Amino acid sequence: MYNPQLETFIRVADAGSFNKAAEQAYITPTAVLKQINLLEADLGVQLFERTHRGLSLTKAGSSLYKDTKYIIQYCKDSVVRAKNAMQENTDIIRIGTSPMTPAQVLVELWPQIHALCPEIKFQLVPFENTPENAREILKNLGQNIDVVAGIFDETMLNLRQCAGFELFEQPLCCAVSIHHRLADKIKLTVQDLYGENLLLMHRDWSHYVDRLRDDLWQNHSKISIVDFDFYSVDVFNRCENGNDVLMAVSVWDNVHPLLKVIPEQSRKLNSE
């Protein structure tokens, strides 16, 4: 459904070399190089800088890399949607799941739901957690995915133009590298964060986070707030690689093996 050379392009970009990409694809380096050369010729842009130190993406390559990941995932999802459209059974609740939106909280409700409605079944639908996918899924709930469990409040629901049902309030936590100075703590106070960079979602995503941001700015200036745009694996990698502190919740404690999620003593985020 899409140019298979794009998958080779992604593989080379992730591997950083033609040889490693060839090993992963079980083809020769020459075949990989040929595909990349053809792709660059077809697109009329140079995707990689080739030096004696290895490969790096050009600006055009970086742009295409982000879009290609979305294109490939969207094509895969379109096949799933087509297959789901063939199913005549309407008594299936399709639960979207990703590292940032784990389905466990809904699956744990399954025995109670099954007792009340034994004819209903669950189906897990995995998806890649990107801004594009999040917008697409929430905009089209009921087509491929019926429900997603995640952190929300009225601000986020209004922004995404969808409805939500509160299951419980989730305490605020902080994620840190297992090598961070705070990793040995069981709970954190706000004073523990003095001198740290705290990664927070940008303003107007959640009024709870906005209230936290304003409180920290006004009363705890020793904490440096760093904005980011979207919770994704890249943000968790940034937290671990940069030795920063990331606002998180306990359901994300298995997202990254090198991060530890530590509760904060008194604050809560509404809701899962």
Image (spheres, grey):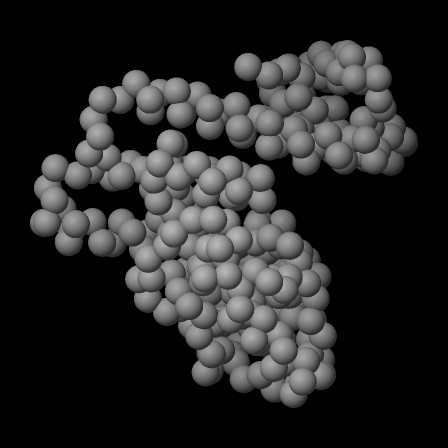
Q: Is residue 138 visible?
A: yes
The quadrant of the picture occupied by the C terminus is bottom left
Q: Residue at x 45, y 70 (%)?
A: 269
Closer to the camera, 32 or 41?
Answer: 41
Q: Residue at x 53, y 68 (%)?
A: 207
Q: Position of residue 257 (x, y in %)?
A: 52, 55
Q: How many marks?
A: 0
Closer to the camera, 119 or 236?
Answer: 119
Closer to the camera, 243 or 120?
Answer: 120
The quadrant of the picture occupied by the N terminus is top right
Q: Position of residue 213 (x, y in %)?
A: 62, 74
Residue found farthest to the right: 52
191 over 28 or under it: above or below: below
Q: Residue at x 37, y 69 (%)?
A: 169
Q: Position of residue 117 (x, y in %)?
A: 12, 44
172 over 228 or under it: above or below: below
28 over 154 or under it: above or below: above
Q: Quadrant of residue 144?
A: top left
Q: Is residue 33 visible?
A: no
Q: Seen in the image, is 131 located left or right of residue 109?
A: right
91 over 261 or under it: above or below: above
Closer to the camera, 179 or 135?
Answer: 135
Q: Quadrant of residue 146?
A: top left
Q: Residue at x 52, y 23 (%)?
A: 75
Q: Position of residue 16 (x, y in %)?
A: 74, 33
